[in-house]
Image (cartoon, helix red, strand yellow):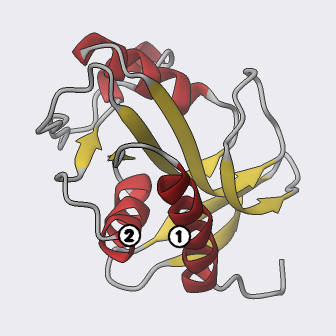
Amino acid sequence: MASKIDVDALIGNITAELKARIEAGSEEPIMIGIHTGGLWVAERLHKMLGLKQALGALNISFYRDDFSRMGMHPQVSPSKLPFSVDDKHIILVDDVLYTGRTIRAALNEIFDYGRPASVILVALVERSGRELPIEASIVGKHISLGSHEHIKLNGPDVLSLSIIEAL
């Protein structure tokens, strides 16, 4: 992909859409970012929206359905949800929505903490190739890639997207 993707502009557009939804709601939602890239995006969104509740972080490593094939990453950090999710409106943020398996794992973990009132899924990028019927409510950019290509968010200080050819 020759064109450069402006990540800051995508985050700005997502912020505007979220702001409109938050203003239309009756209570301020809580935000949770999926480790690693989703958390980087969530940190920016959380700050731009000025949310009062602390930002939550999910590490879904133990919840993945491919855990037995991939094995354990040596630096797995625990999830941090410094609030109750019961009856709360949650904004769940990920960097790239591809097959839907990461989101399925994230929802499973959230429900282990309690039962939220609702979940809005935000993805910086949604790429072709869905395997599960999971769709983001707010997407920064839709991208079609070949089966031999992957998209990766680089960060955390400066966020950029890279298209990588799989070997």
Task: Left or right? Give the position of 54 relative to 142.
Answer: left
Which residue sits at x=49%, y=46%? 25
Query: In the current view of this chain or complex, which residue is farthest to the left?
Result: 82
Identified by mark 1, the residue type is Thr
**Secondary-structure class at tag 2:** helix
Is residue 22 in view from this perspective?
yes
143 to the left or right of 66: right
Crowding around mark 1 (Cα neighbors within 10 Å: few <14, some 14 to 19, many 20+) is many
Residue 53, percent across and down? 19, 52
Identity of the residue drawn at 76% across and 24% down: 131
- Is 65 above or below relative to 57? above
Residue 101, above or below 95? above
Choose between 65 and 96: the one closer to the eye.
Answer: 96
110 above or below 44? above
Q: Quadrant of residue 56?
A: top left
Q: How many marks?
A: 2
Horizontal and vertical percent position of residue 126:
72, 52
Q: Quick one: label 2, few (<14), some, or many (20+) residues within 10 Å?
A: few
Query: Which of the 4 quarters of the picture holds residue 83?
Result: top left
In this rendering, the answer to whether 121 lies above or below 71 is below
> What is the CA distance from the residue labelled 2 to the residue labelled 1?
7 Å
Q: Secondary structure at mark 1?
A: helix
Residue 167 in view here:
no
Q: Which of disc 1 and disc 2 is earlier in sequence?
A: 1
Q: Which mark is residue 15?
A: 1
Mark seen at residue 49: 2
Q: Position of residue 86 (x, y in %)?
A: 27, 19
Q: Amino acid at mark 2?
A: Leu
User: Are the residues tagged 2 and 1 within 8 Å (C-beta)?
Assistant: yes
